[in-house]
Amino acid sequence: MAKLIGGLGTSHVPSISAALDKGLRDTPDWKPFFDGYIPGQEWVKENKPDVAVVIFNDHGNTFFLDKVPTFAVGCAEEYRPVDEGWGPRAIAPFKGAVDFSWHFIDKLVENRFDPMICQEIEVDHGLQVPMELFWGKPEEWPVKVVPIFVNVIQYPIPLPSRCYEMGRVLRQAIESYDSDERFVILGTGGLSHQLQGARAGFVNPEADQAFLNDIANDPDKLANMSREQYVEMFGSEGAELMMWLVMRGAMDPDVLVRHKHYFVPASMTGAGMIVMENRATAASAAAA
């Protein structure tokens, strides 16, 4: 059967890709942020996943406010970068893990989820940035992807607990998939930020740091929070953080944190990263 080897959490701020495209990686403003991801990149190189399941939100590029699915799953052969207003970026298209996507969709329906099924769809910075932060910008991506879109923009957005439940179904799908492929799950978004209204420019570093601790050690606390609490603590756009719960729900209760990084602000956003492994799996690998 397929194997889940780790869970990654990361911000997907669009200015990150702009900094990379403009060659700003090692400038004083950006170097501390990007250097914090080096251990995560090394973890990916060492563990060599075959499939990356990426949980993110579209930003009005593929879905607009007139038609926004609560949950959508891609099952395409290929996912190309969408034009976000200045032309598609010069990065390789992402190869789809088609068979697993259909397997996962079937498991979701069995567990009373009703996702939109996307056989043709483009992806924006919500997927592009996390992939680049961990894999760089290769001529061809070394992993296949499964995009999971979550609506955290047009209210009503899903409950954090529902995202957590989806993670449990994702774990079932991986463990019942007839393959020897190695899976990694990326929960993306946030951390604290608000881009409009009376609190525009809001960041909450204290809450961000607590979140990076709780996502590893007390995910039930995060899953049981209300949507209003996410907005209050992390800002209207910081509510994206509930998408990390899909990744965390797929993992064991007891995890080992391999790496953690926090930087503020990255384009008016608290930005963070975490690399986690199931502690039992890590212990078995070490014993072997």
Image (tube, grey):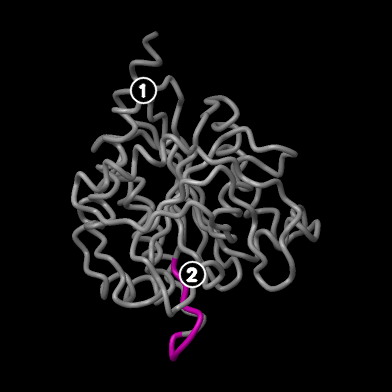
Badge 2 local density, few (<14 within 10 Å), some, or many (20+)?
Answer: some
Q: Where is 123 relative to 83, above or below? A: above
Q: Position of residue 13 (x, y in %)?
A: 57, 63
Q: Where is 59 relative to 217, above or below? A: below
The residue under label 1 is which amino acid type? Asp
Where does the magenta region start and end? 192-199
Relative side of 101 to 129, left or right: left
For label 2, the SS is loop
Quadrant of the frame with the N terminus: top left
The residue under label 2 is which amino acid type? Phe
The residue drawn where x is 46% and y is 24% is 181
Q: Position of residue 174 (x, y in %)?
A: 34, 32
Relative side of 114 to 192, left or right: left
The residue drawn where x is 65% and y is 56% is 81
Relative side of 176 to 142, left or right: left
Closer to us: 199 or 4: 4
Residue sitting at the far bottom: 198
The residue drawn where x is 53% and y is 69% is 269
Q: Is residue 266 magenta?
A: no
Q: How many numbered tags mark residues here? A: 2
The disc label shown at residue 63, or none: 2
Which residue is identified by label 1?
178
